[in-house]
Amino acid sequence: MKATEIKELTVAELKERIEAAKADLVRVKMQHAVSPVENSNVIKNARRDIARMKTVLRQKETLN
């Protein structure tokens, strides 16, 4: 997800997406523990997307 797309989301949408991304990351990590994932960049990209969303969420919360 691009940073520009994240900035357009509302606070509630960001919170929903963060929770969904966290659940997805846990699922992918469990799959990776059982049998290695073909593309290990999926885990790295998911972590970075979550961090981006948390950063934008924090910025929006401090502005209000």
Image (cartoon, rainbow, N blue to C red):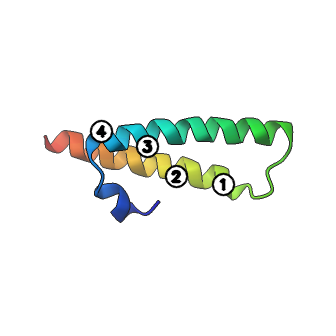
Measured from the top left, where is residue 49 in percent x and y? 49, 52
Determine the secondary structure under disc 3.
helix
Q: Amino acid at mark 3?
A: Arg
Circle 4 Cα neighbour tier, 10 Å, few/some/many (<14 / 14–19 / ≥20): few
The nearer-to-camera label among 3 and 1 is 3
Residue 61 falls left or right of residue 41? left
Residue 32 falls left or right of residue 5? right
- Do the residues bearing badges 4 and 1 touch, measured as CB atoms within 8 Å? no
Q: Amino acid at mark 2?
A: Arg
The answer for how far apart the CA atoms under marks 2 and 1 are is 10 Å
- Do the residues bearing badges 2 and 3 touch, measured as CB atoms within 8 Å? no
The answer for how far apart the CA atoms under marks 2 and 3 are is 13 Å
Q: Earlier in the sequence, mark 3 or mark 4?
A: 4
Determine the secondary structure under disc 2.
helix
Circle 3 Cα neighbour tier, 10 Å, few/some/many (<14 / 14–19 / ≥20): some
- Say which residue appears at 35% left-offset and 44% top-offset: 14
Q: Earlier in the sequence, mark 3 or mark 1?
A: 3
Measured from the top left, where is residue 15 in percent x and y? 37, 37
- Do the residues bearing badges 3 and 4 touch, measured as CB atoms within 8 Å? no
Measured from the top left, where is residue 50 in percent x and y? 48, 46
Residue tagged 1? 42
| Quadrant of the snapshot with the C terminus | top left
Residue tagged 4? 12
The answer for how far apart the CA atoms under marks 3 and 4 are is 9 Å
Determine the secondary structure under disc 4.
helix
The nearer-to-camera label among 2 and 4 is 4
